[in-house]
Amino acid sequence: MLTNADPVTHHFRFLFAMPKKSPEDLRSFRWFGPDTQRGATHRQRFHQLGYRREDFIGKPVIGILNTWNDINTCHGHFPERVKSIRRGVSQAGGLPLELPAISLAEVMQKPTTMLYRNLLAMEAEELIRSYPVDGVVLMGGCDKTTPGLIMGAISAGIPAIYFPAGPMLAGSYGGRSYGAGTDLRRTWDDRKAGILPEEEWLRLEREGLRAPGTCNTMGTASTMTSLMDAMGFILTGGSSIPAAFSGNMRLATSTGERAVEMVHEDLTPDRIATRKSYENAVITDMALAGSTNAAIHMIAIARRAGIDATLDDFRSAADKVRVIVNLKPSGEYLMQEFYDAGGLRAALNEIADLLHLDAMTVSGRTLGEEIGGASIVDADVIRARSNPIIDRPSLAVLNGNLAPDGAVLKVTAASERLLKHEGPALVFDSIDELHANINRDDLEVDENTVMVLRNCGPVGAPGMPEWGFMPLPRKLLKKGVRDLVRISDCRMSGTSYGTCVLHVAPEAAVGGPLALVRTGDTIRLDVDAGSLDLVVDDDELEARRAALSLPPRVYQRGYAALYVDHVLQANDGCDFDFLAGTAPTGEPKIF
Ligand code: FES
């Protein structure tokens, strides 16, 4: 069956009726136009590249920020897609210039890509500001590339449009779809429990992921591209198109075209990243059961645009809508099936009454215009509001004496029996300590234990890795236990599941209350009440605080040292204190 999931294209209207900027009004003219020695130098260099004068003077110059590299498996098709983007730019009368930017390959980069999200944001902003570009196409998709590029582009302030890599094709195992990340973790637990034959395991390693593109569950990559789509930075619906589909190529061409048109229209990020579009993204996140990581990234993105974003926005959005998208890890299906079911446009149309439909998108049309008429093709994949996949909010924002500034829990990926729980803490001071002890046969642990991992936050790790989905003790796995309450100041992958309380703020390494917990203390979690507490009296906690010494810094030099000195806590988006906000940065002097 044909779907209506592709972006609606309106380019004939623009290409024929588009108001054009005069050459002098283009930003790039400051480099290429002046009859000065410096202007002549710039022109001479472009002639050196083989361009004619008319190729680069008076045409919108479009920078293509490409986060491709040989190790980012999710962006493996970018060398082909960039050709389509270039074609789109040229067809619309612009000059495409590829500007490679650091690629954050989620699975490969250690200790975590989160450590480098802000580096990409800085690189994107400075690439845009320091070079003669009038607009940009941002090529990303793998988890942190999306917020990193968008944060930088918002701060740079010239027209910017996002090209999402698109999800990889669905895998298959045992007659059922096999999703990246989520299903590997499930089958790994089976292997660890000794119930999966070696041969079967090797087949899964070899064939589990069989095409380029981002993780095909509603993990962080699909969450963030979907949210940037809902926020207006992607041609609406484009985030749902699988990477290997021809539609992804057409999207690339249209994205290149629109980048040129956006320059002529002065469609800058401040017209797209508004309080309304931010709220649209947050409510979409709840309807999708998006990754917990979105709570950090969305706050960081919004604050770059001067929006006063907090975790309360997520708490109130979670109360307004239930999960209608039936995708792993909360549901059953994968992104390819989501696309076939109508994709994001259909899902957004289902929650249209909760959206600000007058929010502007990169197409130059409003979100309401872009999603109008989109319909659901498969009502099991994209549910009607009256038939959510679970009758609970997608995300819980928790507070209490253990998380004064907040923590989050993905309710839809947690175990119902653990949503209200009280149990004894089992504390690990580091990820090394956890891995050294978790499989000991004499570990004192049972199904009521609350595992605690600390010193793994933005400052402690540093970079807040995805260690919050702690491995379960082997002795419990063998007994059939598949979940415990787990609490940490780090994150977990959007493809993970389990009753994992994450992003506890302030983190232990800066003296947050998580640092005061001792093995055997009682911890109380009540998701419906939104509370997370350490059941220890205040005098005892004060005595522990007085005796507390903070862990030494892991890195003493380089970027990581800068990171530790300036990173904000999770509830503030983990941006750098000197990057958040909208303090203006002037255009570079050209002499
Ligand atoms: Fe790149 Fe999941 S590893 S999107």
Image (cartoon, rainbow, N blue to C red):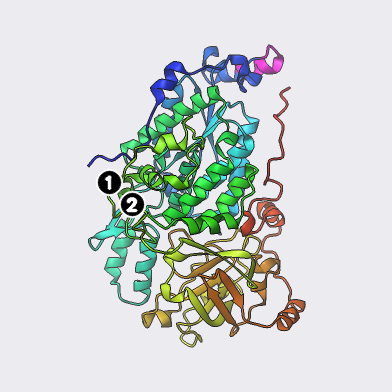
Residue 37, magenta (yes or no): yes
Q: CA distance from mark 2 to mark 1?
A: 8 Å
> Compared to 464, does 243 lie above or below?
above
Is the distance from the Cβ of mark 2 to the nearest ligand 1 atom less than 8 Å? no
Compared to residue 133, the image places residue 7 above or below, namely: below
- On residue 377, the disc is 1
Would residue 489 appear left or right of 137 to someone viewing this image? right
Q: Quadrant of the C terminus?
A: top right
Secondary structure, mark 2, is loop
x, y (%) of residue 438?
A: 49, 78
Query: Which residue occupies the foreground of this view, 29 or 313?
Result: 313
The quadrant the N terminus occupies is top left
Q: Contact, CB < 8 Å: mark 2 with mark 1?
A: yes
- Residue drawn at the location 50% of the way across and 25% of the way down: 260
Query: Furthest-right residue in view?
Result: 546
Residue to which mark 2 is pinned: 382
Q: Which mark is residue 277?
A: none
Q: Residues in magenta?
A: 34-44
Residue 236 sits above or below residue 425 on the image: above
Is residue 220 visible in this depiction of the protein? no
Q: Amino acid at mark 2?
A: Ile
Q: Hey, what amino acid is under mark 1?
A: Val
- Considering only vertical position in the picture, is 243 above or below 261? below
Instruction: Report if residue 558 lies within the magenta region.
Output: no
Residue 441, horizontal then vertical, whole percent? 46, 86
Q: Position of residue 512 (x, y in %)?
A: 68, 69
Majority secondary structure of the magenta segment? helix
Mark 1, Cα crowd under 10 Å, few <14 / some 14-19 / many 20+, is: many
Label 1: which secondary element = loop
